[in-house]
């Protein structure tokens, strides 16, 4: 699914945080686009930012975009505050903010996006709060309040193949178990916030590798699910230094079903990928 153009994001501030090498290569271990891919948490639960760059970026985005990047539904205030307290503790923040802005203030100390999934009266988990400054082609204002099945509805095959697994996982996740999963994409730009239509020139051959590390844990007091998303972007050519990474990537692209290729924009990128491989001889 290629996102539609959105004039509200045209004033997005520059954020040159392209990494020199891939931090993660999820396609090498799980090439399928639709998969649970859960594993025990490794490393820090959130990525604390000592440089202050992410804080500056998030503040600029909030000033420009407002509720497009941060929102808390009334029923999620307690869960958002509990999430905020845990994140602030991880970031070694002494004073934790209170009220509706607590999760936003906590998010300023980390590179991750922070999402709260709250069960409703029927036990269905809904997206109830988020600080979302690096979304991969989805929009908070459209997804806020939706169930997991509704959030995932644009993704071909997902609800039919693993929707039930996702619901069971959310309902059974204990508060003492932290898990992680990864997503991967090939994109024609290095932007962390990705909401706009891809404007691809006829001679374009620039590509980037985008990987998301997601974590999930249950908040012990409110029972909500705390969901973090840390995005990493690097130039595609940097994968050439990782043994077998590019070969695995091209195989994953080739093996992806047509409907998932369209969802990921790989059909649109096909000529760009062809030019990239010819230019780089890879």
Image: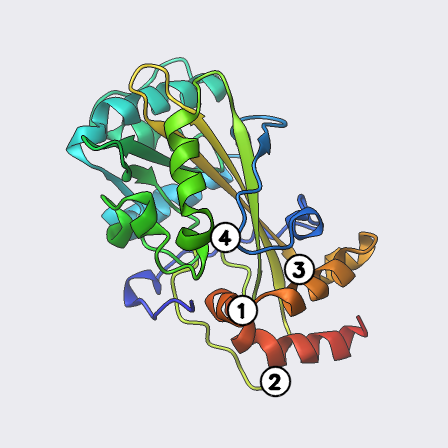
Asked if the residues shown at circle 4 and circle 3 are in contact, with their CB atoms under 8 angstroms apart, the answer is no
- For marks 1 and 3, the one nearer the N-term is 3
Q: Residue at position x 57%, y 42% from top?
A: 37
**Label 3 crowd bin: few (<14), some (14–19), many (20+), radius 10 Å:** many
Report x, y in % for residue 193.
43, 54
Q: Which residue is mark 1?
A: 261
Kindly report the distance in space between the C-alpha atoms of the residues bearing marks 2 and 4.
Answer: 25 Å
N-term-proximal mark, 3 vs 2:
2
Closer to the chain start, of discs 1 and 4, is 4
Where residue 235 is drawn, which disc sits there?
A: 3
Q: Nearer the viewer, mark 2 or mark 4?
A: 2
- Give the image location of residue 89, x and y in percent: 44, 16
Q: Residue furthest bottom?
A: 202
Q: Residue at left 48%, top 53%?
A: 192
- Tell me which corner region of the image, top left, top right, bottom left or bottom right, holds residue 186: bottom right
Mark 3–mark 2 distance (CA, rounded to whole Å): 18 Å
- In the rendered structure, which disc, 2 or 4, sits on the residue that comes first in sequence? 4
- The answer to whether residue 116 is above or below residue 249 is above
Disc 1 to disc 4, C-alpha distance: 28 Å
Label 2 Cα neighbours within 10 Å, binned few <14 / some 14-19 / many ≥20: few
> Cβ–Cβ below 8 Å for labels 3 and 2?
no
Residues at marks 1 and 3, CA–CA distance in whole angstroms: 21 Å
Disc number lying in front (1 or 3): 1
Residue at 66% from the left image edge and 59% from the top image edge: 235
Quadrant where the C terminus sits is bottom right
Q: Which residue is mark 4?
A: 15
Q: Nearer the viewer, residue 148 or 232?
A: 148
Report the residue marked by disc 2: 203
Q: Which mark is residue 155?
A: none
Residue in the foreground of this view, choosing between 55 and 111: 111
């Amino acid at each position: 699914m290629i996102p539609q153009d959105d004039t509200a994001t045209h004033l997005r501030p520059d954020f040159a945080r392209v990494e020199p090498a891939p931090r993660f290569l999820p396609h090498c271990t799980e090439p399928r686009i639709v998969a649970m891919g859960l594993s025990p948490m490794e490393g820090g639960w959130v990525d604390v930012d000592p440089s202050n760059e992410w804080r500056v970026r998030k503040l600029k985005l909030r000033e420009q975009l407002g509720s497009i990047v941060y929102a808390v539904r009334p029923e999620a205030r307690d869960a958002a505050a509990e999430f905020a307290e845990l994140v602030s503790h991880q970031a070694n923040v002494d004073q934790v903010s209170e009220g509706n802005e607590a999760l936003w203030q906590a998010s300023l100390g980390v590179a991750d996006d922070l999402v709260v999934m709250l069960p409703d009266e029927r036990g269905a988990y809904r997206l109830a709060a988020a600080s979302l400054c690096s979304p991969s082609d989805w929009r908070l204002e459209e997804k806020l309040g939706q169930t997991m099945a509704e959030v995932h509805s644009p993704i071909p095959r997902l609800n039919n193949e693993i929707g039930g697994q996702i619901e069971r996982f959310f309902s059974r996740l204990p508060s003492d178990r932290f898990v992680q999963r990864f997503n991967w994409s090939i994109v024609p730009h290095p932007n962390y916030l990705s909401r706009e239509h891809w404007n691809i020139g006829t001679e374009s051959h620039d590509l980037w590798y985008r990987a998301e590390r997601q974590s999930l844990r249950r908040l012990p007091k409110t029972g909500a699910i705390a969901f973090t998303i840390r995005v990493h972007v690097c130039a595609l050519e940097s994968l050439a230094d990782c043994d077998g990474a590019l070969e695995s990537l091209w195989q994953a692209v080739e093996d992806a079903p047509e409907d998932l290729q369209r969802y990921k924009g790989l059909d649109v990128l096909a000529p760009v990928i062809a030019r990239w491989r010819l230019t780089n001889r890879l």
